[in-house]
Amino acid sequence: LCPEKSTANPLLYWPHKEELNRHKRCSKLEMPSKLPFLDLQGKVAIITGASRGIGRTCALELAKRGCGVVIAAKTTEPKKNLPGTIFSVADEARALGGKALAYKLDIRDAKRCVECVEATLEYFGKGPDILINNASALWWQKIEDTPIKKYDLITSINVRGTFAMTKACLPYMVKQGFGRIICMSPPLAPIGFNGRTAYNVSKFGMTMVALGVAEEYQDQNITAHSLWPATIIESLASINFKLGEKAMWRKPEILSDCVIGLIGEDKSFTGKMLIDELYLRSRGYKDEDFVKYRCDPNVEPPKLLMQETSDVWIFRGDVKKLDEDKEKLKELQSKL
């Protein structure tokens, strides 16, 4: 996993020695973390899909650091397998000393995205400084097993929703002279489509939104990146979809730590397609620094999500059809 020696996809971000040395020289020795930090007092962040999981963890980490947070998600009432609401997370953020707005948002509704940003301005007295495009829908199935309605659903949430939310935030970031946008999506790669074509279309679209922002706004102190985990992350999605054993997962804090670091990066650092572990290693993290992220403290999780392979290792789409998906994979493996 040494960035300088990796032979993985060159589209991923591999820091040069000079940049690593510059960062080491400029980092404050008294800071407990190896990541760059920005004073977030007075800043405001919108986090989509923030009623649980990765979005919730990012929102609470920002709130702890004095950032105002908008908990933007659909859930207003807890469900049996989906605990947590926009209101419960907003309460958690306030308990940490942050100011929080709970906002019901379906990012498929572009008008509602605009209204979310307007509500942010009204509540905090300023527009958003930070946008975390986290809301997403999962669908890992082959093309012939993907109904067009399902394709429309995941693309309308993942890429169209991300585009709409980003578009709504940008005018305020331009006016305020500061913007940080992070899309929770994978680096662009020419392989790994087997059983994930529709999903990749939608998730790569999110990454392309980040790349577009980085290029179009590079001189306006607005940066954008995509960020993706090396491992499966503990969340209700990994639990409800039964994505392996807990020992295979990392905690969502690895992503929220990356978010804090990326917000603190200089404006010249933009347009990167990042893997969480590789970014942290580029900022000085060693093997021992990743132990705290393990769900099982005794097991280092496999880096399934950064493997460059076209092998189908899992099917997932509808929680109610998990048994069917498992049988489908067994049948496929029996033919190999």
Image (cartoon, rainbow, N blue to C red):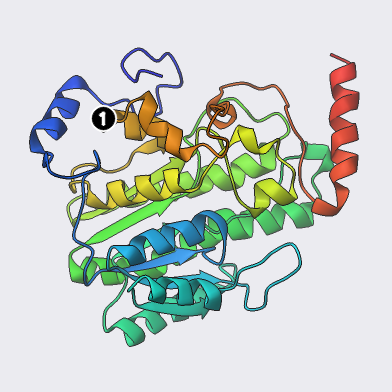
Direction front: furthest residue:
298
* Crowd band around label 1 with a 10 angstrom C-alpha radius: few (<14), some (14–19), many (20+): some
Residue 59: x, y in percent? 42, 63
| In-image side of 216 versus 86 (left or right) | left
Secondary element under disc 1, as helix, strand or loop, is loop
Residue 86 shown left or right of residue 319 in the figure: left
- At 47% from the left edge and 77% from the top edge, which residue is drawn? 91
- Residue shown at 69% from the left, 64% from the top: 82
Q: Residue furthest left?
A: 25
Q: Is residue 322 above or below residue 90?
A: above
Farthest residue toward the bottom? 122
Query: Looking at the rendering, which quadrant does residue 20 occupy?
Result: top left
Residue 138 in sight from this viewpoint? no
Residue 230 to residue 183: above or below:
above
Is residue 17 in view? yes
Amino acid carrying mark 1 in the image: Gly
| Number of marks drawn | 1
Q: Position of residue 239 (x, y in %)?
A: 70, 48
Q: Quadrant of the N terminus?
A: top left
Identify the residue at image location x=86%, y=24%.
332
Left or right: residue 121 versus residue 85 is left
- Answer above or below: position of 121 versus 318: below
**Does residue 161 appear left or right of residue 312 in this picture?**
left
What is the quadrant of the C terminus in the image? top right
Depth order, front residue of 317/221: 317
Q: Position of residue 56 (x, y in %)?
A: 50, 61
* Residue 329 at x, y percent in the picture: 84, 29
The residue that label 1 is drawn on is: 284
